[in-house]
């Protein structure tokens, strides 16, 4: 187990969705049509399992066509696990608050939305906060070559695309930041599987 004084390792996942922010009244019966919220929901379920005890994960979803950010730091803990529809409903509830009430960002909130100027300035800030940053891509170097560095670093950031690859425009912005491009194997994986694999690899190398 982690020593009480030992801090958890901070892990940020940046999901780049080539979509606009969902409509506030999106249908829970058509999640793919709601800016691919089904993809986002599955990734949330992959990042916040109850058994993760040595990591402090966070997810930021960047909707490139409207420059909106969805931030998820955790889920409300309960006895029964969430499913994809429940996650989507939770996102819809917070989205309505954002659209209608235009609430200011509460950094203590587990889930919130906000707007940024553009992708490049957003990514520059991420790189300042997380100097150890990796871009998940099937043409990258094996993650195995960087596990020792990840073990030492206090925090790490992992950038990945959603249902489809990141656009050439946004990929060039990512690569211009001199991030390390890594892969999780020779196959092409779903984004949710990529997230699960990263957490699994980190759980293996970090002290419990």
Image (cartoon, rainbow, N blue to C red):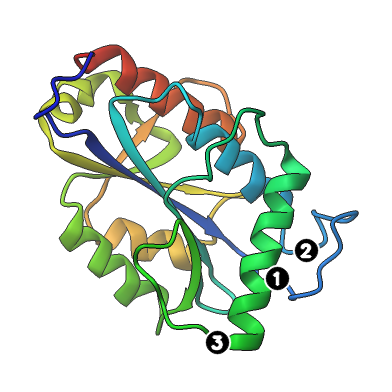
In the rendered image of this protein, does residue 33 appear above or below residue 85? below
Point out the tag, 2 or 3, that comes first from the N-terminus: 2
Q: Residue at x 49, y 36 (%)?
A: 47
Whole-number angstrom distance, CA of label 2 to CA of label 1: 5 Å
Q: Are marks 2 and 1 in contact (CB under 8 Å)?
A: yes
Labelled disc at residue 102: 3
CA–CA distance between discs 3 and 1? 15 Å
Is 102 situated left or right of 24 in this image?
A: left
Q: Where residue 4 sits: x, y (%)?
A: 14, 26
Q: Residue at x 34, y 24 (%)?
A: 53
Which disc number belongs to residue 22?
1
- Residue 80 in the image: above or below residue 191: above
Instruction: Describe residue 34's horizontal placement relative to residue 191 as left or right.
Output: right
Quadrant position of the C terminus in the picture: top left
Disc 2/disc 3 C-alpha distance (Å):
20 Å
Give how far across and how far down residue 91 sits, in percent. 65, 59
Residue 60 percent coordinates (x, y): 44, 57
Residue 148 location, quadrant = top left
**Of helix, strand and loop, which one carries label 1?**
loop
Report which residue position mark 2 lands on: 34
Query: Residue sitting at 22 percent across and 54 percent down?
Result: 178
Horizontally, is 10 left or right of 104 in the view? Answer: left
């Amino acid at each position: 187990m982690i020593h009480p004084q030992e801090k958890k390792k901070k892990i940020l996942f940046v999901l780049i969705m080539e979509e606009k922010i969902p409509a506030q009244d999106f249908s829970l019966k058509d999640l793919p049509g709601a800016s691919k919220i089904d993809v986002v929901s599955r990734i949330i379920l992959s990042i916040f399992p109850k058994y993760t005890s040595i990591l402090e994960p966070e997810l930021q979803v960047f909707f490139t066509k409207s420059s909106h950010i969805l931030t998820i730091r955790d889920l409300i803990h309960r006895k029964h696990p969430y499913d994809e529809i429940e996650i989507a409903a939770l996102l819809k509830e917070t989205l309505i608050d954002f659209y209608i009430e235009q609430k200011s960002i509460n950094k203590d909130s587990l889930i919130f939305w906000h707007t940024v100027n553009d992708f490049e300035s957003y990514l520059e800030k991420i790189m300042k906060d997380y100097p150890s940053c990796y871009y998940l891509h099937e043409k990258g170097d094996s993650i195995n070559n960087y596990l020792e560095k990840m073990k030492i670093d206090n925090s790490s950031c992992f950038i990945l695309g959603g249902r489809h690859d990141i656009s050439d425009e946004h990929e060039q912005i990512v690569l211009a930041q001199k991030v390390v491009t890594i892969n999780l194997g020779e196959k092409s994986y779903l984004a949710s599987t990529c997230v699960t694999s990263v957490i699994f690899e980190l759980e293996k190398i970090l002290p419990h």
